[in-house]
Structures are given as C-alpha cells and as structure tokens.
Amino acid sequence: MISVLVAGGISVRGSYSSDLVVRAPGWLVSAGVAAGATTALGYGAASWFDRGERLSRERLQGISRSVGETFVAHLRGRRRPGRGEIEREVELILEDTPPPEA
C-alpha cells in the first residue's frame, strides 16, 4: 500500500503541462490535480488489493492526467463553484471516464 501511495505522489509531479497551468485559474488547476491524483491513487489501491498488481508509474500518471484535464475542460470559463458542485462534476466525469485497463 505504501508503494502505491508513493508512486501516486510521484505521478502528480510534472504530470500537468505548463500550458494547462497558464491557461486556467489556480483554483481550477489545483482542483483538477487533486481529482486526478485521488482517482489514480484509488485505481492503484484497488488494483493492488483486488489483483495484487501494482500499476506502473506511467499508468498512474495517465489516469491522473486524463481525469485532471477532463475536469479542467468541464469547468473552464465558469465561475468558481462551491464544494458540492465540484463533487458532482467529479462524479459525472468519473461516470463518463472508462476505467483503466489492467
């Protein structure tokens, strides 16, 4: 479990391009990073406990980036939403995002 958390923490660093950061407000980028990283850690933990597999760093980065960028795209250009709205947006994004291949 510790290795999943460490790999997930490492996957967040440098996984978002400066292009994304420059074009979006800070609250939006930080929420996207948090959503992506949390999702990647969840998939990593589930993979570890369900199948005994450790997702690669690249796979964790891919999950994190995909969810984070989708989140930013959904909320870009809108006023900063409240916590409940952000949670609903994340749920909708995760419902529309296919789970990663093992």
Image (cartoon, rainbow, N blue to C red):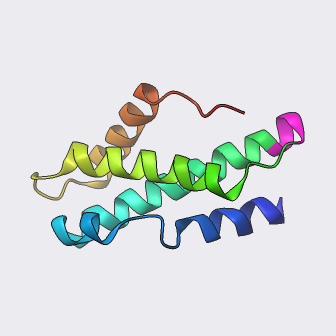
- The quadrant where residue 1 appears: bottom right
Q: Is residue 2 toward the left or the right of residue 95 in the image?
A: right
- The residue nearer to you, when weighing 26 against 15, is 15
Farthest residue in the right direction? 52
Residue 45, percent from left and from top: 75, 48
User: In the depicted view, which residue is nearer to us: 91 or 19?
Assistant: 19
| Quadrant where the image shows the C terminus | top right
Q: Compared with residue 54, is residue 10 higher up or lower down, i.e. above or below?
A: below
Residue 32 location, x and y as percent?
37, 57
Q: Position of residue 88 (x, y in %)?
A: 34, 38
Comparing 32 with 20, the one in front is 20
Q: Is residue 37 above or below residue 25?
A: above
Q: Residue at x 17, y 59 (%)?
A: 80
Q: Residue at x 31, y 54 (%)?
A: 83
**Which residue is found at the position 20% from the left and 72% from the top?**
22
Q: Is residue 91 above or below residue 66?
A: above
With 18 as the anchor, is 2 left or right in this view?
A: right
Principal SS element in the magenta part? helix
What's the magenta region?
48-52
* Image quadrant where residue 28 sits: bottom left
Q: In the rendered structure, does residue 49 fall within the stretch colored magenta? A: yes
Q: Give the image quarter of residue 49.
A: top right
Q: How many discs mark residues in the rendered view?
A: 0
Identify the residue at image location x=11%, y=51%: 78
Q: Is residue 69 left or right of residue 56?
A: left
Q: Does 67 lie within the magenta span?
A: no
